[in-house]
Image (cartoon, grey):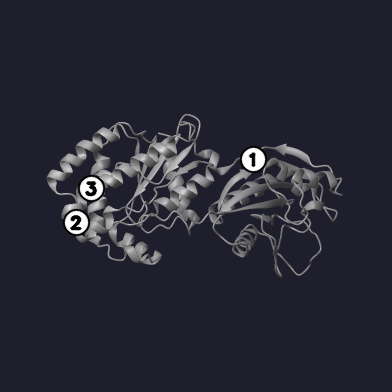
Amino acid sequence: MVYFKTDTNMKLQHQIVLSIGTNQGNRLKNIENCLQFIHQEIGTIIKVSNLYETPSWGFDSDAFYNCALVLHTYKNAQAVLTAFLKIEKKMGRVRGQNLNYQSRIIDIDLITFDEEIIETENLKVPHPLMQNRKFVLLPMQDLNLDWEHPILQKKISDLIEISPDKSVCTLVQKLEIPLDKISLENYNYIAFEGNIGAGKTSLATRFAEDFNAKTVLERFADNAFLPKFYEDQSRYAFPLEMSFLADRYQQIHDDLAQFDLFKDFIVADYHIFKSLIFAKITLAEEEYRLYRTIFNIVYKEIPKPDLYVYLYQNSECLLANIKKRGRDYEQNISASYLDKINDGYLEYIKSQSKLNVLMIDITNRDFVKNQEDYLYILDEIQKKVSE
């Protein structure tokens, strides 16, 4: 039996602003298609501005449709640039040697990248002309960002006031935010669970960022029984499991006490029932019966998630994930041990009649690196909440 630390130093996503424009063909359809491609291929669109019609800037041509959006992504700035240039090409834009302004079926500009200042040969962030373009500033104002230009030291509202651009930008309509398709109004508390290596903390953290939720992430406290357990498992298994149960119970009470379960949206990377699953693997039969009695008393007092999402992955893939992330303390995990944990979770899920359970098979999926895999999980959640 092996115990492992939970990695709470999760990599946060970058928050970037893109500006989109088009003045050829079906302008509304171009904008909608571009938003869909960005959401599917680059990152998660969190906010979208209203759609504006603006006169061409810098040359005489048909009027443009413009909007701005907030994107969450793990990609770096250069990777984002490469990705949206591919989208432009896919949509039919041809970038030639002519550097003059011209009509285009789609135009995507990287306006901000976190609070960073980037200056490379092919990329400057914040966009060096954003303060001179009302068709960038007005849509950005719709996004209600707490952002200040890192060079000019001014908010968007201040930049609009001093902008030399006096052109008239006309409001056309609202645009749909992709995440609005997932209706979570009736869900205040979602718990993600999974075996070791399934990526539950990574997913819970990303999901919480994208849906503006508060997180309850399993903590790892130095446990005085852990070294003794490794020396004499039969003697110290029970006090070890009891100490873990007490710590999880305390954490849930401490963390949830900070929130209003009727107003706040909470995302957790575990459900306390995992204590019983691991105890069943660790403890002798008589000890487990006693532990289960105590656990049932504790369990009655714990708030239950509105949605319990179990991330299923076979042991072969879990071992590959564990090897890839390279933590020394995980390298002795066996496939048989992972099988027992999976069996314990599946047995628990089958026994639940009152808990709202969603099991998602994530075998061979990487929802951190691949946006398509992340959207697959969101789609499964959408189907569940629509039932």
| Residue linked to disc 3 | 239
User: CA–CA distance between discs 2 and 1?
Assistant: 59 Å
Real-space Cα separation, disc 3 to disc 2, in angstroms: 10 Å
Quadrant housing the C terminus: top left
The residue at 85%/53% (across/down) is 60
Label 2 belongs to which residue? Answer: 233
Q: Is residue 64 visible?
A: no
Q: Amino acid at mark 3?
A: Pro
* Residue 25, position as x, y percentages in the image: 71, 50
Q: Earlier in the sequence, mark 2 or mark 1?
A: 1
Secondary structure at numbered mark 2: helix
Q: Quadrant of residue 330?
A: bottom left
Badge 1 amino acid:
Leu
Say above or below: 240 vs 96: above
Query: Could you say where residue 62 lies in the image, as x and y percent from the top left?
Result: 80, 49
Q: Please name whichever residue, 285 or 195, is drawn nearer the observer in this view of the structure.
A: 285
State left or right for residue 63 relative to residue 192: right
Q: Are marks 2 and 1 in contact (CB under 8 Å)?
A: no
| Residue in view at x 17 percent, y 44 percent | 288
Q: Considering the numbered disc 3 on the image, is that residue within a helix, a strand or a loop?
A: helix
- Quadrant in which the N terminus appears: bottom left
Q: Does residue 7 lie above or below 215 as drawn?
A: below
3 or 1: tag closer to the N-terminus:
1
Residue beneath label 1, please?
175
74 vs 5, left or right, is right
Callout in the foreground (2, 1): 2
Q: Amino acid at mark 2?
A: Gln
Q: Residues within 10 Å of mark 1 (few under 14, many from 20)?
A: some
